[in-house]
C-alpha cells in the first residue's frame, strides 16, 4: 500500500480513499505535503491540521466548480464537484466527533455530491427508508441493460464509511453494468443516519437490514426474489448476521470478514492489536454507539459476534479479504466460512500481491475487489445483462 504517512496508518488510508473517490494525485499532494510532520505527532492538534488542509483543498476545488456552474458549463462543474466531494469527505471523516466544523463539512460533502450527480446525469437517486420514526438515507442505482425485473444488492457500510464513498469508488456502477441494481444505505451508526438523524449503531443489524429489504422489494423494476445483502469492513459481521436471521436474502457478501469483534477491540485498546481506521478512535466509538465511556463501548463490541448463528445462513455467501489486512485478521474469514455449513455455496477470496487489493477491504486497490464482488453477484443472482 502506498503510505503517504508511513507512521500514521489512518491518515495514509484516508489519502488513498480520497484518491479512490475521485481525487487528483496533485491535489492530494497539495493537501498532504504540509502534514508530514503533523502525521508523526498524532496528537489532537495534528488532526485539526489534517482537517484544515483538506478543507482548504475542498474549498478551492468547490469554488472552481462554482465558476463553471455559473457560466453554464455544468458537465465541467460536475466533475469538479466530484473531486470536492472526495476532499470534503476526507476532511470530515477523520475529524473529532462533535467538533463544531464537522457537520458543516459533512453538509458540504452532501451538497457537492448532489451537484455532481445532477450535472453529470449519474444513475443515482437519493431515497429515504423509514425506520423507527426516522429515515435511513440511501442511494439507489438501477440495473442497466435488463429487460424485466432485475436483481438488487442492498449495501451497508462499516464503522466509518458513507454511502457517497461507496458510490464514488464504483460499487453500484459495476453492479449496474452487470444487470444488478444497488441500494446503498446509511444505516444506524454511519453516514447521514448518524450525522443528521442521530441514529446509533446496534449489533442487531438484521432489524434495519430487513426494513431495507422491504424497501428494495417495493422498488419498481426490482425482482424481490433476487435481493442480496453486502456490507464492508464491520459489515463482515452485518451481512452474515442479516442473512442468518432473515431467510429472504438471495445471497450475502462480507467485504472484509468479522466473526468476533470484542477481542479485536480489547486488543486495540491494550496496545497489542490491529490498526485503527480513524483518528480519535475512542471518541468515534462513543459517538457511533451513543456511549459515554470506552468500557461501555467495549461491552457493546462484545455483542458483535457471529457465534451460534452461521448455520442458519441458507443462501450463497462470499467473503473477500486482503492477505495483508491490518485491521481484521484472516482467522475471522476462516471461522465465518467454516460455520456457514448450510449455505449452498461458500466462497472465500483472498486478494494477493499478484492481484492487488491486499489491504483492508482493498483500500490499496478498490477496483479489483469491486470487480470480483460484482462478477460473483452477477453469477449467483443470474443476471441477464
Image (cartoon, rainbow, N blue to C red):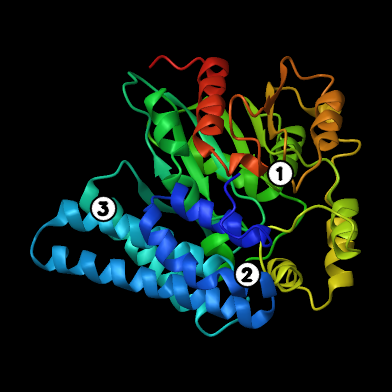
User: In the figure, residue 11 lies in which quadrant?
Assistant: bottom right
Q: Outermost residue toward the bottom?
A: 100
The CA span between labels 3 and 2 is: 30 Å
Give the mark nearest the N terminus, 2 or 1. 2
The circle drawn on residue 39 is 2
Q: Which of pointers 1 and 3 indicates the residue nearer the eye?
A: 3
Q: Residue 309 in the image: x percent, y percent?
A: 85, 35
Quadrant including the C terminus:
top left
The circle drawn on residue 256 is none
Note whether residue 359 is visible.
yes
Q: Is residue 354 above or below residue 27?
A: above
Task: State left or right for residue 165 relative to residue 307.
Answer: left
Task: State left or right for residue 150 relative to residue 100.
Answer: left
The circle drawn on residue 79 is 3
Instruction: Provide the residue designation for mark 1.
Output: 238
Quadrant including the N terminus:
top right
Q: Which of pointers 2 and 1 indicates the residue nearer the eye?
A: 2
The CA span between labels 1 and 3 is: 33 Å
**Residue in view at x 55 percent, y 25 percent:** 372
Q: Are marks 2 and 1 in contact (CB under 8 Å)?
A: no
Q: Outermost residue toward the left?
A: 71
Task: State left or right for residue 313 relative to residue 133.
Answer: right
Please state which of residues 222 and 44 is positioned toward the viewer in this rendering.
44
Amino acid at each position: 500500500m502506498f503510505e503517504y504517512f508511513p507512521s500514521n496508518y489512518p491518515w495514509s488510508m484516508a489519502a488513498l480513499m480520497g484518491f479512490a473517490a475521485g481525487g487528483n494525485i496533485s491535489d492530494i499532494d497539495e493537501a498532504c505535503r504540509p502534514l508530514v510532520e503533523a502525521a508523526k505527532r498524532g496528537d489532537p492538534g495534528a488532526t485539526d491540521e489534517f482537517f484544515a488542509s483538506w478543507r482548504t483543498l475542498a474549498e478551492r476545488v468547490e469554488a472552481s466548480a462554482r465558476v463553471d456552474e455559473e457560466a453554464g458549463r455544468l458537465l465541467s462543474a460536475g466533475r469538479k464537484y466530484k473531486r470536492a466531494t472526495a476532499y470534503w469527505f476526507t476532511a470530515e471523516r477523520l475529524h473529532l466527533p462533535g467538533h463544531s466544523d464537522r457537520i458543516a463539512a459533512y453538509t458540504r460533502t452532501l451538497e457537492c455530491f448532489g451537484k455532481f450527480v445532477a450535472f453529470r446525469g449519474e444513475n443515482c437517486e437519493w431515497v429515504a427508508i423509514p425506520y423507527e420514526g426516522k429515515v435511513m438515507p440511501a442511494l439507489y442505482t438501477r440495473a442497466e441493460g435488463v429487460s424485466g425485473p432485475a436483481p438488487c444488492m442492498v449495501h451497508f457500510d462499516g464503522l466509518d464509511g458513507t454511502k457517497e464513498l461507496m458510490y464514488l469508488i464504483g460499487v453500484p456502477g459495476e453492479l449496474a453494468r452487470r444487470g444488478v441494481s444497488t441500494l446503498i444505505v446509511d444505516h444506524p451508526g454511519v453516514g447521514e443516519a448518524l450525522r443528521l438523524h442521530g441514529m446509533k449503531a446496534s449489533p442487531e443489524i438484521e432489524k434495519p437490514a430487513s426494513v431495507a429489504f422491504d424497501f428494495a422489494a417495493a422498488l419498481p423494476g426490482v425482482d424481490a426474489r433476487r435481493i442480496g445483502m453486502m456490507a464492508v469492513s464491520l459489515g463482515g459481521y452485518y451481512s452474515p448476521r442479516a442473512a442468518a436471521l432473515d431467510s429472504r436474502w438471495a445471497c450475502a457478501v462480507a467485504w472484509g470478514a468479522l466473526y468476533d469483534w470484542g477481542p479485536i477491540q480489547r486488543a486495540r485498546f491494550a496496545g497489542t492489536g490491529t490498526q485503527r481506521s480513524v483518528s480519535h478512535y475512542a471518541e468515534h466509538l462513543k459517538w457511533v454507539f451513543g456511549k459515554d465511556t470506552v468500557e461501555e463501548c467495549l461491552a457493546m463490541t462484545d455483542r458483535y459476534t457471529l457465534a451460534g448463528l452461521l448455520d442458519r445462513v441458507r443462501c450463497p455467501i462470499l467473503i473477500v479479504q486482503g492477505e495483508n489486512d491490518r485491521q481484521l485478521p484472516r482467522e475471522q474469514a476462516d471461522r465465518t466460512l467454516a460455520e456457514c455449513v448450510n449455505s449452498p455455496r461458500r466462497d472465500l477470496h483472498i486478494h494477493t500481491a499478484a492481484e492487488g487489493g491486499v489491504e483492508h477491504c482493498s483500500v490499496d486497490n478498490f477496483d479489483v475487489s469491486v470487480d470480483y464482488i460484482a462478477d460473483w453477484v452477477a453469477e449467483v443472482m443470474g443476471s441477464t445483462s
